[in-house]
Image (tube, rainbow, N blue to C red):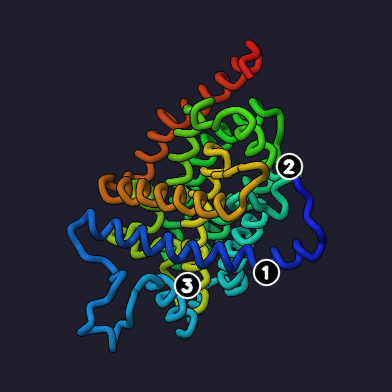
Amino acid sequence: MAEYYPISLILTGLVLVPVIAFVLSIIYAYELRKVTARLQARRGPYFIVPKEVRSVLGVSRLFQPLYDILKLLYKETIVPSTAIGSVFRTAPYVALASLIATLYFVPMGGFSLFGQFEFSIVAISYLLLMVPLALTVGGASSSSPWGAIGAQREAELTLAYEVPQILGIFALAIMANTLSISSLIDFQNQRIPFLILNPFAAVAVFIALIGKLQIKPFDISEAEVEIVAGPLTEYSGRLLGILEIMKTLLTFLVPALFIDLFLGGALVRTTTLNYPASAALFILESLFIVVIAAVIHVYSPRFRVDQAFKWFSKFPLVLGLIAIVWAYAIKIFGVL
């Protein structure tokens, strides 16, 4: 059943949820780097630093992504004189604020401040859509040709992956007859996970979420060897640091959303919901999903934007449509 929390817990959660999510996202970002490096026969950031260099590097580099973000936050921010200054400065804050707002709707190990509300899936979909839109507007306002090209690619890629993602998610809503993500989790725990009930939706949404992470083969808008950094080309200092925080948080949100939608939220129940065990299982499943993302990133060549659009139209989009038909068939024939 949906659980409504007292106001004191909500106020505490408004502070703690982004902090916990950010700490976990730093760990996941480290894992993504480390696994990627190992698959490419590189060392990657040290987990345990050799004794001879600990005086310089410290005992561990687990929080290397955090150090990189802090470095950017302390650097000077330069705004191109020809850029649309207000739009250029505002876009990173809009993207980050949208992700932070999303965190309050996405359950983490069974806990969510606002996930129990009836239209929480719709809220999550719109808030996540604000991220690529902000990047598109920010890149286009930079006056850089690389930013403009990257913004165009960002918009095209977003259109390509958003449609199958929405189809896959709403196939689940049809099966469970709800638009609440917490109710979707309850539905799975009363029956079986949607990964088994509707694998077509699971594959479509997973591919779309990989596109949202912008790792290979979908790192098209920021292709360094082609367009420098795409929409991020002219960003520097604090603004670039905010964008790095946003990208790091996505490393947490993507596995969390997939776990909630298709793996029953990683809930562990004894007589009641066991929050510590659920949180541990949630983190383990998230780490496993990050490993899968790293493998895809390493072994996939980058698509051209037209190739990505056609590929999404042929496979994830078709899977999303099949997922909708499958959901209606299950409802009509009374399987659930």
Q: In which quadrant of the rendered view does residue 122 lie?
A: top right
Q: Position of residue 137 (x, y in %)?
A: 56, 60
Q: Which residue is mark 2?
A: 119
User: What element does badge 1 sit on?
Assistant: helix
Q: Position of residue 171 (x, y in %)?
A: 60, 28
Q: At 32% from the left edge and 79% from the top edge, which residue is drawn?
A: 59
* For residue 234, side relative to residue 12 (left or right): left
Q: Residue furthest right?
A: 7
Find the distance from the CA under tag 2 to the CA under tag 3.
33 Å
Return the disc, 2 or 3, that comes first in the chain's sequence. 2
Residue 333 to residue 96: above or below: above
**Kind of residue sitting beneath label 3:** Leu
Return the disc, 3 or 1, that comes first in the chain's sequence. 1
Query: Which circle, 3 or 1, is nearer the viewer?
Result: 1
User: What element does badge 2 sit on?
Assistant: loop
User: What element does badge 3 sit on?
Assistant: helix
Q: Residue furthest bottom?
A: 55
Closer to the camera in the image, 152 or 288: 288
Which quarter of the rendered picture does the C terminus lie within? top right
* For residue 296, side relative to residue 181 (left or right): left
Q: Position of residue 67 (x, y in %)?
A: 41, 77
**Kind of residue sitting beneath label 1:** Val
Closer to the camera in the image, 149 or 187: 187
What label sits on residue 240 in the rendered view? 3
Closer to the camera in the image, 168 or 237: 168
Q: In which quadrant of the rendered view does residue 69 lie?
A: bottom left
Residue 312 to residue 244: above or below: above
Find the distance from the CA under tag 3 to the CA under tag 1.
23 Å
